[in-house]
Amino acid sequence: VAGEKLGEPSLIAAAARAADFVLGHMRTGGVLQHSWRAGVAKIPAFCSDYAYLIHGLLALHTATGEARWLDSARELAAEQIERLEDPNGGFYTSAESEDVLFRSKDVFDGALPASNAVATDNLLGLFERTGERGYLDSARRALSAVAALVSQHPEGVKSTAIAARRYWRLSAEAPGDEPVGPSFEDLAAQAERLVQPQFELSEPRVDGWRRFALILTIAPGWHLNANPASAEFLVPTLIEAEGARLQEIVYPGGREVRMAYGDGPLSIYDGTIEISGELIQDAESARLMLTYQACDENRCLPPITRLAVVS
């Protein structure tokens, strides 16, 4: 099942047949199995097996309204919690075994969302459908275990950030629950306060183009990623225009430093910097938008795009 809403009857029927097969043939001794071949199911399921199967069952429940899909999702979620949940929050990739020296967790997104993020979202989906507080509590523990990653490396854990926002919405409707760290809105507001922009604009030339300078004053102890950014998971400082065209944009050279994150030196902006260029308005009102990611020595806040100036 690709998503939580299926509107095509043939797709729903195909998904239901696949789910029936897995539930009927891939549970040995009451435990979900990872693989099936030639009539034999083997290898106890991993976190990703539970996460994506439960996600599909919840999608089928949404699409059909049939209680059996929700019942199966709840049964598998209980099994996943019993076999794989870390008491400190989140889910191990596999169960305890003599062959496993170290139990890891899948928390970073790759080609697919991280299995821990999907598992957490499933718990929230189960809470929405049943109202059982245990699901919300388990989701809270999972998010608390990786809360620092959401603020330090938001680009690598986007699916977890989405689950965190869903948790915030649900917890607001469930009195007595405590937030999991600062909300995305709180972090974005902090990032905005850390950078003070000043805009300077010349008189238009004969051809209508005007020189501009955007001067950014960055709070002490914080920096922005230079343009270009020196690592794929970092967001470069960038200006764009709405209702205007830009040309000859000049970003300053960054200062190279070493931080707790990143394999090599990073190129940053700190203190006061100036971005210059030329603009010409295509509309009566033009908006200059600034995108940046504010970081300190140990973490990066979520990247934000804010209005720099209206002319």
Image: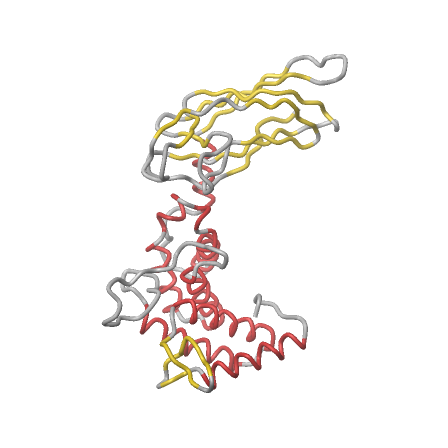
Q: Quadrant of residue 282?
A: top right
Q: Quadrant of residue 96?
A: bottom left
Q: Quadrant of the N terminus?
A: bottom right
23 vs 95, left or right, is right
Most extreme residue toward the right is 206
What count of labels does the image hold? 0
Q: Residue at x 51, y 38 (%)?
A: 304
Whether 185 is drawn above or below 79: the answer is above
Most extreme residue toward the front is 38
- On the question of residue 41 being in view, the answer is yes
223 vs 242, left or right, is left
Q: Residue at x 47, y 23 (%)?
A: 253
Q: Quadrant of the C terminus?
A: top right
Q: How is the image coloured?
A: secondary structure
Residue 88 at x, y percent in the picture: 28, 60
150 vs 238, left or right, is left
Q: Quadrant of residue 132?
A: bottom left
- On the question of residue 168 being in view, the answer is no
Residue 269 at x, y percent in the picture: 44, 26
Residue 285 at x, y percent in the picture: 70, 28
Residue 225 at x, y percent in the picture: 45, 32
